Image (cartoon, rainbow, N blue to C red):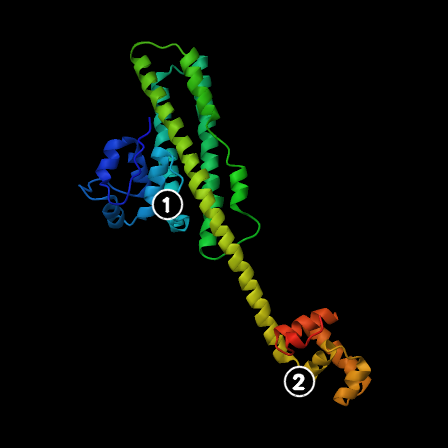
Protein backbone atom coordinates (compact mmCIF):
# COMPACT_ATOMS: atom_id res chain seq x y z
CA UNK A 1 0.00 0.00 0.00
CA UNK A 2 1.35 3.40 -0.95
CA UNK A 3 2.40 5.96 1.65
CA UNK A 4 -0.13 8.80 1.34
CA UNK A 5 2.14 11.52 2.75
CA UNK A 6 2.84 14.47 0.48
CA UNK A 7 6.52 15.26 0.98
CA UNK A 8 7.68 18.86 1.09
CA UNK A 9 10.94 20.77 0.84
CA UNK A 10 11.36 21.11 4.62
CA UNK A 11 11.02 17.35 5.27
CA UNK A 12 14.23 15.54 6.06
CA UNK A 13 15.59 13.56 3.12
CA UNK A 14 16.37 10.57 5.33
CA UNK A 15 12.72 10.45 6.44
CA UNK A 16 11.56 9.98 2.85
CA UNK A 17 14.02 7.12 2.39
CA UNK A 18 12.95 5.47 5.65
CA UNK A 19 9.32 5.61 4.51
CA UNK A 20 10.08 4.58 0.92
CA UNK A 21 13.41 2.79 0.48
CA UNK A 22 12.59 2.14 -3.18
CA UNK A 23 13.32 5.79 -4.06
CA UNK A 24 17.04 5.17 -3.51
CA UNK A 25 17.47 4.61 -7.24
CA UNK A 26 15.66 7.89 -7.92
CA UNK A 27 18.24 9.69 -5.79
CA UNK A 28 20.99 8.30 -7.99
CA UNK A 29 19.15 9.28 -11.14
CA UNK A 30 18.90 12.86 -9.89
CA UNK A 31 22.62 12.81 -9.14
CA UNK A 32 22.06 12.98 -5.38
CA UNK A 33 24.78 11.24 -3.37
CA UNK A 34 24.23 9.67 0.05
CA UNK A 35 25.88 10.98 3.22
CA UNK A 36 23.63 14.03 3.64
CA UNK A 37 23.01 13.54 7.36
CA UNK A 38 19.79 15.10 8.69
CA UNK A 39 19.48 17.78 6.04
CA UNK A 40 16.12 18.71 4.57
CA UNK A 41 15.14 17.95 1.00
CA UNK A 42 15.72 21.59 0.08
CA UNK A 43 19.18 21.63 1.66
CA UNK A 44 20.25 18.38 0.00
CA UNK A 45 18.97 19.47 -3.42
CA UNK A 46 20.59 22.90 -3.19
CA UNK A 47 23.89 21.40 -2.01
CA UNK A 48 23.90 18.95 -4.92
CA UNK A 49 22.53 21.37 -7.56
CA UNK A 50 19.21 19.64 -8.13
CA UNK A 51 15.97 21.57 -8.63
CA UNK A 52 13.97 20.97 -5.43
CA UNK A 53 10.52 21.51 -6.93
CA UNK A 54 11.15 19.03 -9.76
CA UNK A 55 12.68 16.45 -7.41
CA UNK A 56 9.63 16.57 -5.14
CA UNK A 57 7.23 16.43 -8.11
CA UNK A 58 8.82 13.17 -9.32
CA UNK A 59 9.17 11.69 -5.83
CA UNK A 60 5.58 12.45 -4.82
CA UNK A 61 4.35 11.09 -8.13
CA UNK A 62 6.32 7.85 -7.98
CA UNK A 63 5.42 7.24 -4.33
CA UNK A 64 1.77 8.29 -4.24
CA UNK A 65 0.77 9.16 -7.79
CA UNK A 66 0.35 12.89 -7.11
CA UNK A 67 -0.05 14.73 -10.42
CA UNK A 68 -1.11 18.16 -9.19
CA UNK A 69 1.61 20.80 -9.02
CA UNK A 70 1.20 24.33 -7.75
CA UNK A 71 2.93 25.61 -10.87
CA UNK A 72 3.88 23.25 -13.71
CA UNK A 73 6.02 26.01 -15.22
CA UNK A 74 8.34 25.68 -12.23
CA UNK A 75 9.30 22.15 -13.25
CA UNK A 76 12.89 22.14 -14.47
CA UNK A 77 13.14 20.45 -17.86
CA UNK A 78 16.96 20.07 -17.66
CA UNK A 79 16.48 18.33 -14.29
CA UNK A 80 13.87 15.99 -15.77
CA UNK A 81 16.15 15.13 -18.68
CA UNK A 82 19.05 14.52 -16.30
CA UNK A 83 16.79 12.18 -14.31
CA UNK A 84 15.60 10.25 -17.38
CA UNK A 85 19.08 9.96 -18.88
CA UNK A 86 20.58 8.69 -15.63
CA UNK A 87 17.71 6.20 -15.35
CA UNK A 88 18.54 4.91 -18.82
CA UNK A 89 22.19 4.53 -17.90
CA UNK A 90 21.28 2.60 -14.76
CA UNK A 91 18.85 0.31 -16.54
CA UNK A 92 20.99 -0.43 -19.60
CA UNK A 93 24.35 -0.45 -17.86
CA UNK A 94 23.48 -2.25 -14.63
CA UNK A 95 19.98 -3.67 -14.27
CA UNK A 96 19.70 -5.56 -17.56
CA UNK A 97 23.22 -7.12 -17.39
CA UNK A 98 22.64 -7.99 -13.70
CA UNK A 99 19.44 -9.89 -14.43
CA UNK A 100 21.02 -11.67 -17.38
CA UNK A 101 23.91 -12.79 -15.19
CA UNK A 102 21.42 -14.13 -12.67
CA UNK A 103 19.64 -16.13 -15.38
CA UNK A 104 22.96 -17.52 -16.63
CA UNK A 105 23.84 -18.73 -13.13
CA UNK A 106 20.38 -20.22 -12.54
CA UNK A 107 19.84 -21.97 -15.88
CA UNK A 108 21.47 -24.92 -17.56
CA UNK A 109 21.97 -23.59 -21.09
CA UNK A 110 22.33 -27.14 -22.42
CA UNK A 111 18.57 -27.37 -21.88
CA UNK A 112 16.48 -26.21 -24.83
CA UNK A 113 13.92 -24.42 -22.64
CA UNK A 114 16.71 -22.58 -20.83
CA UNK A 115 18.17 -21.43 -24.13
CA UNK A 116 14.77 -20.19 -25.26
CA UNK A 117 14.40 -18.23 -22.02
CA UNK A 118 17.79 -16.60 -22.57
CA UNK A 119 16.78 -15.77 -26.14
CA UNK A 120 13.52 -14.22 -24.95
CA UNK A 121 15.38 -12.14 -22.40
CA UNK A 122 17.91 -10.95 -24.98
CA UNK A 123 15.08 -9.93 -27.31
CA UNK A 124 13.52 -7.95 -24.48
CA UNK A 125 16.84 -6.27 -23.62
CA UNK A 126 17.37 -5.36 -27.28
CA UNK A 127 13.88 -3.79 -27.52
CA UNK A 128 14.45 -1.76 -24.36
CA UNK A 129 17.86 -0.61 -25.59
CA UNK A 130 16.40 0.55 -28.91
CA UNK A 131 13.59 2.39 -27.14
CA UNK A 132 15.89 4.24 -24.77
CA UNK A 133 18.45 5.02 -27.48
CA UNK A 134 15.65 6.55 -29.55
CA UNK A 135 14.93 8.90 -26.66
CA UNK A 136 18.63 9.71 -26.30
CA UNK A 137 19.20 10.37 -30.02
CA UNK A 138 15.89 11.98 -30.98
CA UNK A 139 13.69 13.13 -28.09
CA UNK A 140 16.24 14.68 -25.74
CA UNK A 141 18.15 16.59 -28.48
CA UNK A 142 14.78 17.89 -29.73
CA UNK A 143 13.97 19.19 -26.25
CA UNK A 144 17.45 20.70 -25.93
CA UNK A 145 16.79 22.61 -29.16
CA UNK A 146 13.48 23.88 -27.79
CA UNK A 147 15.22 25.11 -24.66
CA UNK A 148 17.69 26.96 -26.90
CA UNK A 149 14.83 28.55 -28.89
CA UNK A 150 15.47 26.36 -31.93
CA UNK A 151 11.95 25.19 -32.73
CA UNK A 152 11.75 22.67 -35.58
CA UNK A 153 8.37 21.99 -37.13
CA UNK A 154 9.15 18.50 -38.47
CA UNK A 155 8.95 16.79 -35.06
CA UNK A 156 7.00 17.22 -31.84
CA UNK A 157 6.53 15.45 -28.53
CA UNK A 158 3.16 14.12 -29.72
CA UNK A 159 5.03 11.95 -32.22
CA UNK A 160 6.98 10.43 -29.34
CA UNK A 161 3.86 10.11 -27.20
CA UNK A 162 1.97 8.13 -29.87
CA UNK A 163 4.83 5.63 -30.16
CA UNK A 164 5.59 5.52 -26.45
CA UNK A 165 4.12 2.06 -26.01
CA UNK A 166 4.91 -0.42 -23.31
CA UNK A 167 8.13 -2.31 -23.94
CA UNK A 168 7.87 -4.75 -21.05
CA UNK A 169 5.55 -7.34 -22.62
CA UNK A 170 8.44 -9.74 -23.25
CA UNK A 171 9.56 -9.33 -19.63
CA UNK A 172 6.05 -10.15 -18.43
CA UNK A 173 6.02 -13.20 -20.70
CA UNK A 174 9.45 -14.30 -19.47
CA UNK A 175 8.35 -14.03 -15.84
CA UNK A 176 5.29 -16.20 -16.46
CA UNK A 177 7.26 -18.86 -18.34
CA UNK A 178 9.79 -19.16 -15.52
CA UNK A 179 7.03 -19.52 -12.93
CA UNK A 180 4.87 -21.97 -14.88
CA UNK A 181 7.26 -24.18 -16.80
CA UNK A 182 10.83 -24.07 -15.55
CA UNK A 183 11.74 -26.82 -13.06
CA UNK A 184 14.63 -26.20 -10.70
CA UNK A 185 15.96 -27.38 -7.36
CA UNK A 186 18.51 -26.70 -4.65
CA UNK A 187 20.98 -23.87 -5.18
CA UNK A 188 19.77 -23.17 -8.69
CA UNK A 189 16.24 -22.79 -7.36
CA UNK A 190 17.41 -20.11 -4.90
CA UNK A 191 19.29 -18.32 -7.66
CA UNK A 192 16.28 -18.48 -9.97
CA UNK A 193 13.93 -17.19 -7.26
CA UNK A 194 16.28 -14.29 -6.55
CA UNK A 195 16.50 -13.46 -10.25
CA UNK A 196 12.74 -13.72 -10.64
CA UNK A 197 12.38 -11.27 -7.75
CA UNK A 198 14.71 -8.88 -9.60
CA UNK A 199 12.61 -9.27 -12.73
CA UNK A 200 9.50 -8.26 -10.79
CA UNK A 201 11.31 -5.21 -9.44
CA UNK A 202 12.56 -4.44 -12.94
CA UNK A 203 9.02 -4.63 -14.32
CA UNK A 204 7.74 -2.28 -11.61
CA UNK A 205 10.61 0.16 -12.13
CA UNK A 206 10.08 0.28 -15.89
CA UNK A 207 6.35 0.95 -15.49
CA UNK A 208 7.15 3.77 -13.07
CA UNK A 209 9.73 5.20 -15.46
CA UNK A 210 7.20 5.20 -18.31
CA UNK A 211 4.61 6.91 -16.08
CA UNK A 212 7.03 9.71 -15.21
CA UNK A 213 7.55 10.26 -18.94
CA UNK A 214 3.82 10.09 -19.73
CA UNK A 215 2.48 12.10 -16.79
CA UNK A 216 5.25 14.64 -16.15
CA UNK A 217 7.80 14.86 -18.95
CA UNK A 218 5.52 14.78 -22.01
CA UNK A 219 2.96 17.32 -20.64
CA UNK A 220 5.77 19.70 -19.68
CA UNK A 221 7.30 19.46 -23.17
CA UNK A 222 3.87 20.13 -24.70
CA UNK A 223 3.76 23.38 -22.72
CA UNK A 224 7.28 24.24 -23.84
CA UNK A 225 6.32 23.57 -27.47
CA UNK A 226 3.31 25.85 -27.16
CA UNK A 227 5.46 28.67 -25.82
CA UNK A 228 8.11 28.03 -28.47
CA UNK A 229 5.53 28.09 -31.26
CA UNK A 230 4.09 31.33 -29.95
CA UNK A 231 7.58 32.82 -29.76
CA UNK A 232 8.31 31.55 -33.27
CA UNK A 233 5.13 33.13 -34.64
CA UNK A 234 5.88 36.39 -32.80
CA UNK A 235 9.40 36.40 -34.21
CA UNK A 236 8.08 35.84 -37.73
CA UNK A 237 5.53 38.64 -37.36
CA UNK A 238 8.22 40.91 -35.97
CA UNK A 239 10.47 39.98 -38.88
CA UNK A 240 7.69 40.68 -41.37
CA UNK A 241 7.06 44.08 -39.78
CA UNK A 242 10.77 44.86 -39.84
CA UNK A 243 11.01 43.77 -43.46
CA UNK A 244 7.94 45.84 -44.22
CA UNK A 245 9.52 48.85 -42.52
CA UNK A 246 12.73 48.33 -44.46
CA UNK A 247 10.74 48.08 -47.68
CA UNK A 248 8.91 51.26 -46.80
CA UNK A 249 12.26 52.98 -46.58
CA UNK A 250 13.12 51.83 -50.12
CA UNK A 251 9.95 53.36 -51.59
CA UNK A 252 10.34 56.84 -52.99
CA UNK A 253 8.21 59.67 -51.64
CA UNK A 254 6.33 59.73 -54.93
CA UNK A 255 5.57 56.00 -54.70
CA UNK A 256 4.23 56.49 -51.17
CA UNK A 257 2.00 59.28 -52.49
CA UNK A 258 0.71 56.96 -55.19
CA UNK A 259 -0.10 54.30 -52.55
CA UNK A 260 -2.00 56.85 -50.45
CA UNK A 261 -3.96 57.96 -53.50
CA UNK A 262 -4.81 54.36 -54.42
CA UNK A 263 -5.96 53.64 -50.87
CA UNK A 264 -8.21 56.68 -51.08
CA UNK A 265 -9.87 55.12 -54.13
CA UNK A 266 -8.46 57.33 -56.90
CA UNK A 267 -8.19 56.10 -60.49
CA UNK A 268 -4.94 56.36 -62.47
CA UNK A 269 -6.18 59.55 -64.16
CA UNK A 270 -7.21 61.09 -60.82
CA UNK A 271 -3.82 60.23 -59.34
CA UNK A 272 -2.06 61.76 -62.36
CA UNK A 273 -4.10 64.97 -62.02
CA UNK A 274 -3.61 65.06 -58.24
CA UNK A 275 0.17 64.61 -58.43
CA UNK A 276 0.59 66.56 -61.69
CA UNK A 277 2.20 63.62 -63.52
CA UNK A 278 1.24 61.63 -66.58
CA UNK A 279 -0.91 58.51 -66.50
CA UNK A 280 2.02 56.47 -67.87
CA UNK A 281 4.15 57.68 -64.96
CA UNK A 282 1.41 56.56 -62.53
CA UNK A 283 1.36 53.13 -64.18
CA UNK A 284 5.15 52.89 -63.89
CA UNK A 285 5.00 53.83 -60.21
CA UNK A 286 2.31 51.19 -59.59
CA UNK A 287 4.42 48.57 -61.36
CA UNK A 288 7.45 49.46 -59.22
CA UNK A 289 5.37 49.42 -56.03
CA UNK A 290 4.00 45.94 -56.84
CA UNK A 291 7.53 44.68 -57.58
CA UNK A 292 9.01 46.07 -54.35
CA UNK A 293 6.16 45.09 -52.04
CA UNK A 294 4.94 41.97 -53.82
CA UNK A 295 1.44 43.31 -53.21
CA UNK A 296 -0.95 43.60 -56.13
CA UNK A 297 -4.44 44.04 -54.65
CA UNK A 298 -6.02 47.28 -53.37
CA UNK A 299 -6.84 45.52 -50.06
CA UNK A 300 -3.22 44.47 -49.67
CA UNK A 301 -1.97 48.00 -50.33
CA UNK A 302 -4.51 49.36 -47.84
CA UNK A 303 -3.22 47.04 -45.10
CA UNK A 304 0.36 47.96 -45.99
CA UNK A 305 -0.42 51.68 -45.82
CA UNK A 306 -2.09 51.34 -42.41
CA UNK A 307 0.70 49.19 -40.91
CA UNK A 308 3.36 51.62 -42.13
CA UNK A 309 1.45 54.71 -40.98
CA UNK A 310 1.01 56.12 -44.48
CA UNK A 311 -2.70 56.60 -43.76
CA UNK A 312 -4.82 56.62 -40.63
CA UNK A 313 -7.23 53.71 -40.40
CA UNK A 314 -10.08 56.08 -39.54
CA UNK A 315 -9.73 57.73 -42.95
CA UNK A 316 -9.98 54.46 -44.88
CA UNK A 317 -13.28 53.29 -46.32
CA UNK A 318 -13.49 49.62 -45.33
- Is the residue marked by circle 1 packed among few (<14), some (14-19), or many (20+) residues within 10 Å? some
Which residue lies most toward the bottom here?
A: 276
Please indicate, yes or no, whether residue 142 appears anywhere in the rendered image.
Answer: no
Q: Which residue is mark 1?
A: 82
Residue situated in front as seen by the camera: 94 or 304: 304
Please, is residue 132 above or below residue 268 in the view? Answer: above
137 left or right, relative to 95: right
238 left or right, relative to 126: right
Element type where label 2 sits in the image: helix
Residue situated in front as seen by the camera: 117 or 273: 273
Q: Which residue is mark 2?
A: 253
What percent of the width, then of the height, locates residue 196? 36, 20
Separation of marks 1 and 2 at Cα, in angstroms: 58 Å
Picture quarter with the C terminus: bottom right
Residue at the image position 47 percent from the left and 51 percent from the top: 224
Residue at the image position 40 percent from the left and 33 percent from the top: 208
* Quadrant of residue 17 within the rendered picture: top left
Please, is residue 122 above or below residue 260 in the view? Answer: above
Residue at the image position 48 percent from the left and 40 percent from the top: 134
Please indicate, yes or no, whether residue 72 appears anywhere in the rendered image.
Answer: yes
Please, is residue 255 above or below residue 57 in the view? Answer: below
Please, is residue 278 above or below residue 316 in the view? Answer: below
Residue situated in front as seen by the camera: 186 or 198: 198
What percent of the width, then of the height, locates residue 91? 37, 34
What percent of the width, then of the height, locates residue 206? 41, 31
Residue at the image position 58 percent from the left and 70 percent from the top: 241
Element type where label 1 sits in the image: helix
Of badges 1 and 2, nearer the viewer stands 2
What percent of the width, then of the height, locates residue 271? 77, 83
- Marks 1 and 2, the one that precedes in the sequence: 1
- Is the residue marked by circle 2 packed among few (<14), some (14-19), or many (20+) residues within 10 Å? few
294 left or right, relative to 8: right
Amino acid sequence: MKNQKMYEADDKMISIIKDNYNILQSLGSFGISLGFGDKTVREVCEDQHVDTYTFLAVVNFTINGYRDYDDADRLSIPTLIQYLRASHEYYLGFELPYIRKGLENALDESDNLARLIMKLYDEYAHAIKNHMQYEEKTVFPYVDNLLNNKFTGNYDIETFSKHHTQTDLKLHELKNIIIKYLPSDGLHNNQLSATLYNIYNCEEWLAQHAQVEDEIFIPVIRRLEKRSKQSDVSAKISNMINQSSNTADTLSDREKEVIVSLVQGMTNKEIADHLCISINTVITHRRNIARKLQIHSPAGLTIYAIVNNLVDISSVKL
